Amino acid sequence: MEQKIKQKGINIGGNIRQIRKMKNIGQTELARMVQLNDVYMTRETLVKIERGIQHITGAQLKGIRDCLNTTYDELLKEFHS
């Protein structure tokens, strides 16, 4: 999965941030929500993922997707600011 994302040049963290903002969900709230899905995440971890400083695991990605109620394809969508 990560290799496909790198090949496409998708900024998954930036896309998470875009979708989170579109759905009006703060970083702290999303981090708390992801913990409810059996994946431990702090706000600091989410900030690092969104900034591209930290890699995201499959479990973290699934937890975030579930909480944002979004699909894998939507996360791979190219957003234009």
Image (cartoon, rainbow, N blue to C red):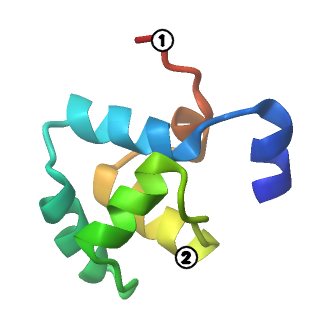
Residue for badge 2 = 59
- Is residue 66 in view? no
Among the 4 quarters of the image, the one containing residue 31? bottom left
Identified at 30% across, 60% down, the residue is 67
Residues at marks 2 and 1, CA–CA distance in whole angstroms: 27 Å
Dot 1 amino acid type:
His
- In the picture, measured across the screen, residue 44 lies left or right of residue 5, that is left
Task: Say which element carries label 2.
Answer: helix
Q: Position of residue 22 (x, y in %)?
A: 24, 29
Residue for badge 1 = 80
Q: Residues within 10 Å of mark 1 (few under 14, many from 20)?
A: few
Query: Looking at the image, is 9 positioned above or below residue 27?
Result: above
In depth, the one of 54 and 61 nearer the eye is 54
Q: Quadrant of the N terminus?
A: bottom right
Dot 2 amino acid type:
Ala
Q: Position of residue 13 (x, y in %)?
A: 49, 47
Q: Position of residue 49 (x, y in %)?
A: 47, 58
- In the picture, measured across the screen, residue 8 lies left or right of residue 28, that is right
Q: Nearer the viewer, mark 2 or mark 1?
A: 1
Task: Say which element carries label 1.
Answer: loop
Identified at 24% across, 81% down, the residue is 36
Identified at 58% across, 21% down, the residue is 78
- Is residue 33 in view? yes
Q: Position of residue 57 (x, y in %)?
A: 60, 72
Residue 31: assigned label: none
Q: Quadrant of the C terminus?
A: top left
Q: Residues within 10 Å of mark 2 (few under 14, many from 20)?
A: few
Identified at 42% across, 60% down, the residue is 48
